[in-house]
Amino acid sequence: CIGVYAAIDRGGGGQPTHAVLLLGISGGLLVALMQQLSVVSMLDVQYMEPLSTFLQVVKIFTFDVEDIIHLSCIGRMAAVAHFTTKVCMIFAACLFVCLVHVAFVLFRHGGRFRERTPSLIAVFGSLAIVFYISVTVTILQPLQCNKNPNGRWTTQAYEDVICWEPEVDGGHLIMLIVGLVALNLPGGLFLGVYRLVRKLPTALKTGDIRFMRSYGFLFFRFRPQAHWYIMVIMARSLFIGIVPIIPRDIAQIYALQIALLSCFAACIYVQPWRVPYLNFMDAFFGAVMILFMNITAFCVKETNLEVLGWVCVAMVLVALALLAALLVLALLRRCGKLTKPFRFF
């Protein structure tokens, strides 16, 4: 955290070189890939060795507080207290960033807090985007429930907490309330970034330098024509973070594949990254994850073949409907129904 702040503070809001972009964004893509794999390890799937061990190692990239601090070593904690502590640690991390900012401004910039506010915003935003999947997964843990042989559902992280039966276990209801309140953090960040993307053209026209210094970290990595691509990355991270709450294993795999395929197609079509090599790297990582999810489908515990059959039929019908729509559009253009008015003037 201190290193990230020092790097951003030293940059002063200027445009980084291609070498710095390549290094920084490559690291971000690698962390995103590891976090995606860590979400895969949370799916309700029985993995074989050595894949199971590999996913357990990769799971550290969820940056679970339990893996860092080992709350169980402090003392025996109830599930509700344990989950609440983990959520509070997210906000404690935000407070720590603020303390780092205060220290830098006091000792390095002579207490000019208003002038250095863009650095604080850039650090907050950069770290939030990098750890967006991890934060979302942690907050949604009360909704990640698995079905047991006795017919009851228990949370994946706390197997002694019974889901959806408040008359039997009221702790789950408390965890749900805490999680829904904390969900304002990733949800508010998503809406805030959307608002900034909409505001960027106006800021450029008016020459709003403070806006670019504060929020330029969202856009400098992309080509000017693809400044909105940060929303694709945010939507992918949010969707992947939500996937573990889906109750069926095969549905989880399908949902992940849809998200990964959509982003893979967007990357190939838009080529958003300012450094061309990063487009290839992003597409390659996407292809690896798609292939990985295809292999993961062989590890599901039980498969409803009828459901799979209907899914396949639906996919073929959607493809045929899209082809038919394109043919109709081509015919309309050929017949002159969609020609531009006054095209000869």
Image (cartoon, helix red, strand yellow):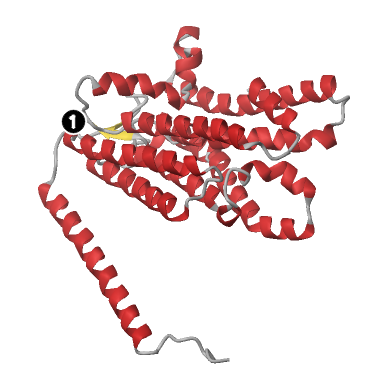
Picture quadrant of residue 11: top right
The image position of residue 154, as x and y in percent, is 31, 30
Tell me, yes or no, if residue 242 can be seen here: no
Towards the viewer: 86 or 136 = 136
Picture quadrant of residue 315: bottom left
Few, some or many residues within 10 Å of mark 1 (<14, 14–19, 20+):
few
Q: Residue at x 54, y 42 (%)?
A: 275
Question: Viewed as shown, does residue 271 lie left or right of 144?
Answer: right
Towards the viewer: 324 or 306 = 324
The image position of residue 300, as x and y in percent, is 18, 35
Question: Viewed as shown, does residue 325 lie left or right of 275?
Answer: left
Quadrant in which the C terminus appears? bottom right
Question: Viewed as shown, does residue 320 lie left or right of 71?
Answer: left
The image position of residue 291, as x and y in percent, is 27, 39
Towards the viewer: 250 or 5 = 5
Picture quadrant of residue 46: top left
Residue 200 against residue 149 in the figure, above or below: below
Q: Residue at x 57, y 57 (%)?
A: 225
Question: Viewed as shown, does residue 275 lie left or right of 102?
Answer: left
Number of marks in picture: 1
Q: Residue at x 55, y 30 (%)?
A: 23
Q: Residue at x 59, y 52 (%)?
A: 227
Q: Does dot 1 land on a helix, a strand or a loop?
A: loop
The amino acid type found where label 1 is placed reads: Asn
Q: Label 1: which residue?
A: 150
Tell me, yes or no, if residue 320 can be seen here: yes
Quadrant in which the N terminus appears? top right
The image position of residue 208, as x and y in percent, is 78, 52
Extreme residue toward the left, this view: 305
